[in-house]
Amino acid sequence: MASPASPPPSLRFGQVVIGPPGSGKTTYCLGMQEFMGQLGRKVVVVNMDPANDGLPYKCAVDVSELVTLDDVMDSLKLGPNGGLLYCIEYLEANLDWLENKLNQYSDYYFLFDCPGQVELYTHQSSLKNIFSQLSKWNFRLASVHLVDSHYCADPAKFISVLCTSLASMLHVELPHVNVLSKMDLIEQYGKLAFNLDFYTEVMDLHYLLDHLASDPFFKKFHQLNLKLAEVVEDYGLVSFVPLNVQDKQSMTSVLRTVDKANGYCFGDLEERNLQAMMSAAVGADFQFDSALGVQERYVKTREATVEEEMMDL
């Protein structure tokens, strides 16, 4: 007589934190771990980056115990990019190791701190396959894609950010939240051409292209930028949530957005009533008001010149 099948594991919720190098993924994991700990959630951080050897947070599962970038580069004579791709493919081939490690934490909230190599999220399939396997293990995940907010001050770089964010959303195939990180440094490299909600809601990009055309260098690429902007607008998927890790209100806004994306707000891990669930589902917090509040805190206002006022009229 066949033995009865073991019951499937209970739902486990979490975030996979992705984004380009230097966008603040590790800092985000540290801040979110502390923030959710203050809310009473039991949180574990999983380091998925074999090149990240200086971890500021308490790490429950570390992929460096399985494979490290330095060992791969030395033994296979690979560069940093090729070595990192090999490490992720090696992790994909040893998912039983990852499963055994994760099964030690049954009723925790998970933060997966991922590498910063962009091609892992845009066209290479190993991380996508790992995320898919996690879903089969009853993980309910949302990808949190971090990008530096100061790119908003450069129209060309912002268009590039939009294309990278869109490609990541389509490739990773998870509920997706795009985050503008380091909001306290948003105007470090230049002033914003428009209000913050223009960038967070990704409004009519033709205004951005007109602003870009004023630069003689980019004027000859106008048609290319126009087609890229049309691709982003045709999909209509990309928007951003502003974040300053040191701001409690900003962290709350991001966490509420992620909880809606991965379904945590509908789970049974905390006491919730129907009213709270419905307000979360409908989205009682208006993104415009949120962006307006962030702009008041981090974007310096300036007086319009007489010439600008005449042009507006």
Image: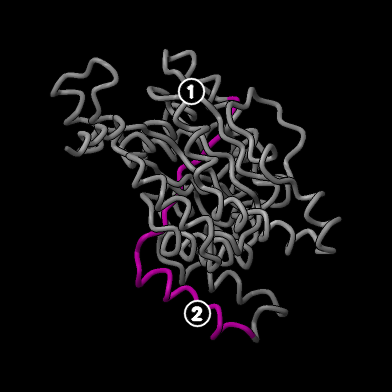
Left or right, 286 with reference to 223: left
> Residue drawn 39% across and 24% down?
106
Looking at the picture, tell me which residue is in the foreground, 261 or 241. 261
User: Which percent across, then down, holds residue 230?
Assistant: 42, 76
Residue at mark 2 to residue at mark 1: CA–CA distance: 43 Å
Q: Earlier in the sequence, mark 2 or mark 1?
A: 1
> Label 1 belongs to which residue?
43
Q: Which mark is residue 226?
A: 2
Q: Which image quadrant: the N terminus? A: top left
Tag 1's secondary structure? strand
Q: Can residue 300 be spotted in the picture? A: no
Report the colour scheme.
Answer: one colour
User: Which percent across, then down, holds residue 184?
Assistant: 64, 35
> Residue drawn 47% across and 49% down?
178
Q: Amino acid at mark 2?
A: Leu
Residue 198 belongs to magenta span? no
Q: Which residues are magenta?
A: 221-246
> Residue drawn 53% across and 43% down?
17
Residue 245 belongs to magenta span? yes
Callout 1: 10 Å neighbours few (<14), some, many (20+)? Answer: many
- Asked which quadrant contains residue 97, the reply is top right
Tag 2's secondary structure? helix
Looking at the picture, tell me which residue is in the foreground, 206 or 171. 171
Above or below, 44 against 187 in this view is above
Tags 2 and 1 in contact by the CB under 8 Å rule?
no
Q: Which image quadrant: the C terminus? A: bottom left
Callout 2: 10 Å neighbours few (<14), some, many (20+)? Answer: some
> Residue drawn 52% across and 55% down?
127
Farthest-out residue, left: 274
